[in-house]
Image: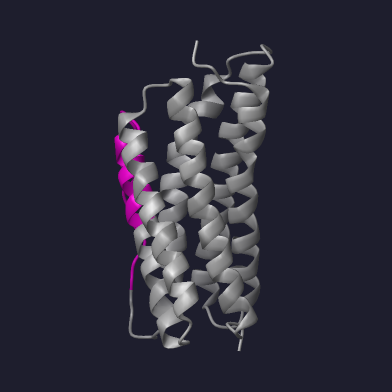
Amino acid sequence: MNGITVFMALVDYLPVIFFFLAALLLQNDLYSKLSKTKYTLLAAGSLMVLIGGTLKATWKILYALSICDFQALDVSFFPFQGIGFLLVFLSLTGICTKKFNTKALSIVPLYLSNMPFIILQVIGCAGAQFMLIAKSLQMKKKSATALYVIAFIFMLGMGYLGAKFDDSSNMHWLAQCTNIISQLSFLAGTWILHKSGLAH
């Protein structure tokens, strides 16, 4: 129907792994810099993004192997990713200055389509990337800044593709490649900050 193959599904785990490694670096480096509340938001948001990506890739594996079309795994992607990235953004508002005072959202949009969660994903990712760009500029790491900008641009591409998704094989591959570039850039930028003393 949509040309999903086992190889395609396996490739879809790559951005999940890249994000997971970047999240581990951030959690390790920022443990002593964030309040308990913000660190909890970082851990919870990272976990939600990780779960969302893993469920989507697992759905593709099951579908490609003709085991089943477990659509709950597929449709859970955007709710997990959208809210997860928003929590990551909220957690990072304190890494450059202590003057931020951001409150968590008290109302979650009613799930009628993927669009509310695509919007949350873009807002959350944009906010997180902005905070990390600001931190990399503060640390005078232009290469990390450039990588976070690339990650943000390709994440915007993911939001656009999510809104236009037609479930074709070409669209699946385009979305996966876009996500891989975004998450690999995110990981590389985070690795540069980690090696440059983000924890200190």
* Residue nearer the viewer, 40 or 9: 9
Is residue 155 a member of the stretch shown in magenta?
no
Q: Residue at x 36, y 45 (%)?
A: 157
Q: Residue at x 54, y 47 (%)?
A: 180
Provide residue 182's location: percent of width, then percent of height: 48, 53
Q: Is residue 8 visible?
A: yes
Provide residue 78's location: percent of width, then percent of height: 43, 38
* Residue nearer the viewer, 162 or 29: 162
Provide residue 20's location: percent of width, then percent of height: 63, 55
Is residue 110 a member of the stretch shown in magenta?
yes
* Residue nearer the viewer, 45 or 121: 121
Quarter the C terminus occupies? bottom right
Question: Which stretch did the figure color magenta?
Answer: 102-124
* Residue nearer the viewer, 72 or 160: 160
Kindly indicate the quadrant of the structure image that contains residue 24: bottom right
Provide residue 160's location: percent of width, then percent of height: 31, 40
Q: Residue at x 67, y 33 (%)?
A: 10
Task: Decide: is 86 above or below 62.
Answer: below
Kindly indicate the quadrant of the structure image that contains residue 103: bottom left
| Left or right for 125, reference 36 | left
Task: Decide: is 145 above or below 141.
Answer: above
Q: In this figure, what is the number of numbered marks?
A: 0
Q: Which residue is drawn at 43% across and 21% down?
A: 167
